[in-house]
Image: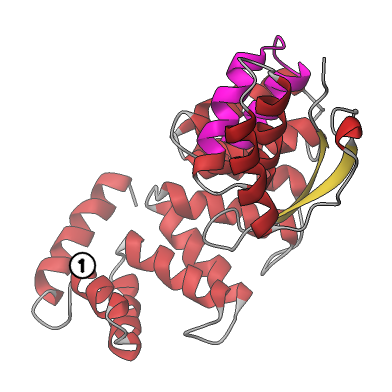
Amino acid sequence: MTQLIKVALFSALMTVLSASFASYEEAVADYNNGNYFTAIDAFKKLAKANDARAQRVLGLLYLDGKRMDHDAKKAFEWLTHASDWDDVTARYFLGVLYAHGEGVRKKPKEAVEWWEYAAENSHPLAQSQLGLVYFQGKGVRRDYTKAAQWWKKAAEQGEMSAQRFLGLVYMTGKGVKRDDKEARRWLLAAAKQGDVMAQYNLGLMLAYGRGGEEDFKEAVKWLKKASKQQKIKKQPLDQLGDSLHQEFAVVDKWYRIAAEQDADLVLVRRK
């Protein structure tokens, strides 16, 4: 069946069925108002009528397991249906499932392919994920330049983790020419969104005048914000500028990054 025929069939089905159950927008409103049973029932009916948005939501609900029983296989099935209708977000999450072996056999290369589909269609989370994949060399050959390129695309769309990583690579010169002004700019963008690692590194850059003038008042402000979110090991002031390396676990909910990843981060140097 061609895509044109699918679209025509879908339109016909929606016309016939619209009188019998809620629209997608109504289902979303019900869900947001706490009417979960009504909303989920509507999502199921819409999904069976080939509404890609409802198929994607249903897949995520099965994956999340808060309002429905967790069922990764059903999540994979519904996300696949949604991706068949070119739902970009569904393709991103299919990459997540393949990366972690949720509902399907773990296949890192297959995950990368799905993320590439979504990233080429400007999906910021997929772009950010590809940046991390190329930076770490998981499922692809390690390529710092490509990592920085994907992070920049995502960062320009406001994706927080990409802004953080882009700031760090500008600070260390991995994949891009080292540029402290750009590092400070992107770390500030992520810090404003509440990213603790960005807040910490931004505070140190301000304290040591990297990428601009020294500003101890602003430095203290951002370091305090970071410390309130995550306890940072206290060190003597004269050691803060040392080169520090740590394995940093980036953990976000399924509805953001939907994965647990590791990344080598190099913190601020005095010079």
The quarter in which the C terminus is drawn is top right
What range is drawn magenta here?
A: 163-190
- Nearer-the-camera pick, 69 or 79: 69
Residue 164 belongs to magenta span: yes
The x and y percentages for residue 175 are 73, 17
Query: Residue at the top extreme?
Result: 177
Report the residue at 50% width, 46% height from top: 193
10 Å neighbourhood of mark 1: few (<14), some, or many (≥20)? few
**Residue 237 visible, this orientation:** yes
**Is 4 situated left or right of 69 in this image?**
left
Verify whether residue 220 appears in magenta. no
**Residue placed under numbered mark 1 in the picture:** 25
Figure quadrant of residue 265:
top right
The residue under the point 74% across, 42% down is: 109
Which of these two is toward me, 192 or 6?
192
Q: Main secondary structure of the magenta part?
A: helix
Quarter holding residue 244: top right
Q: Of helix, strand and loop, which one carries label 1?
A: helix
